[in-house]
Amino acid sequence: MTLIHESHSDTAAPLRETAIQAHGIEMAYQVGDHAFKALKGIDLEIQTGDIELLMGPSGSGKTTLLSILGGILTPTAGEITLLGQKITGLSRRRLAKFRLQNIGFIFQGFNLFPALTAAENIEATLNLKGIRGRAAKKTALKLLKQVDLADKRHNLPRDLSGGQKQRVAIARALAGNPRLILADEPTAALDSQIGHTIMELLRRLAQEEGCTVLMVTHDPRIQDIADRVVYVEDGLIIPQQPANFSAPKPEVQYP
Ligand code: ADP
Ligand code: MG
C-alpha cells in the first residue's frame, strides 16, 4: 500500500491551497520615451474560497494589478502562481488555455459579441470550454436566470441597457464554473437591488463551490461579505485602510 498523503496532526487545520500567489510584481508602462511605474513591487497571497476586495484611489494601479494577476498583462517584474500553476513564463497559447479553463473575468474591456444574443454570448463561451448543444443552451439559461435576465435571452447587446449588458458579462464569466473570478467594479453599472443579487451569487460560489473571487470595488457595502480588503495606493499595497480613505466614485463607465 502506498501512502499518498502524509497525515498531519489531527488538530491541524485543513490545508487550503493558495489560489493566487504574486511576488515582486512591478509594471512599467512606456509613455512616450519614458517608463511610468504603475506597480512598484506587489506581494499578495489569496486563499482558495476567499472573497477579497481591492480598494484604492483612482489611478493607484488596481486594474493593472487585476489584469496582471489574470495573465492578461505581462508584468515587467515578478512571478505569479495561480491554483498551483506558475503562469509567469507560460507560452501565450498555454496561458490562454489556462485562463479559459480556470478564470472568469468580469472586466469592462471584455465586450459581448454584438451579433450574438445574450444567450448565444454565453453559449459561445461554453462551447469554447467544450460544453455544446442542448447542454450549453440549458446552462446559459440557468446562468441568465441567476442574474435575473432570462426574459432578455433573445436580445442582442444593442437592445440591452448598460446594466443588463454587464449582467450578461457576469453570467458569461461564471460559465463553466471557473475556479477564480477576477472582477473590475462588477456592480458599478447596476442598481443596488441587482448589485446585491450579484454579490450574493458570488458569495455562494465562493462558499459552496470553493471559487475564489478578487474584485475591485468602490462599494463600501460589499466589505461586509469580503474575507479581506486589500488597499492599493500609488502602485503599492498598504497595510490597512488609511485614515483619510474615502471611496471615490466609480471610474468605470459602461456604455
Ligand atoms: P486604477 O484601476 O486603480 O484606477 P490603473 O491600473 O488603471 O489604476 O492605472 C494605474 C496607473 O497606470 C495610472 O496612473 C494610469 O494612468 C496608468 N496606466 C494605466 N494603463 C496604462 C497604459 N496602458 N499606458 C500608460 N499608463 C497606463
Ligand atoms: Mg481601474
Image (cartoon, rainbow, N blue to C red):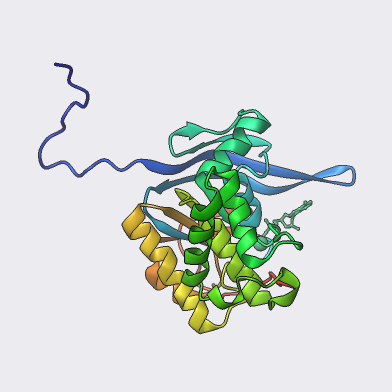
The quadrant holding residue 42 is top right
Q: Position of residue 41 (x, y in %)?
A: 59, 43
- Look at the image and tell me in which quarter the C terminus lies: bottom right
Instruction: Give the residue at x 52% y 83%.
Output: 192
Quick one: which residue is furthest to the top in this view? 1
Nearer to me, 231 or 71? 71
Q: Position of residue 151 (x, y in %)?
A: 57, 78
- Up-down relation of residue 7 to residue 233 (above or below): above
The answer to whether residue 16 of the structure is visible from this angle is yes
- Up-down relation of residue 11 to residue 173 (above or below): above
Q: Position of residue 98 (x, y in %)?
A: 55, 37
Instruction: Give the residue at x 54% y 42%.
Output: 130
- Look at the image and tell me in which quarter the N terminus lies: top left
Quick one: which residue is furthest to the left in this view? 10
- Up-down relation of residue 120 to residue 199 (above or below): above
Query: Is 31 on the left-hand or right-hand side of 92?
Result: right
Quick one: which residue is furthest to the front in this view? 134
Instruction: Give the residue at x 55% y 57%.
Output: 173
Q: How many marks?
A: 0
Q: Position of residue 183 (x, y in %)?
A: 56, 59
- Up-down relation of residue 254 to residue 94 (above or below): below
Query: Is 223 on the left-hand or right-hand side of 153?
Result: left
Instruction: Give the residue at x 49% y 83%.
Output: 193
The quadrant holding residue 172 is bottom right
The answer to whether residue 66 of the structure is visible from this angle is no
Query: Is 234 on the left-hand or right-hand side of 219?
Result: right
Nearer to me, 4 or 233? 4
> Ligand 1 lies in which image quarter?
bottom right
Nearer to me, 138 or 14? 138
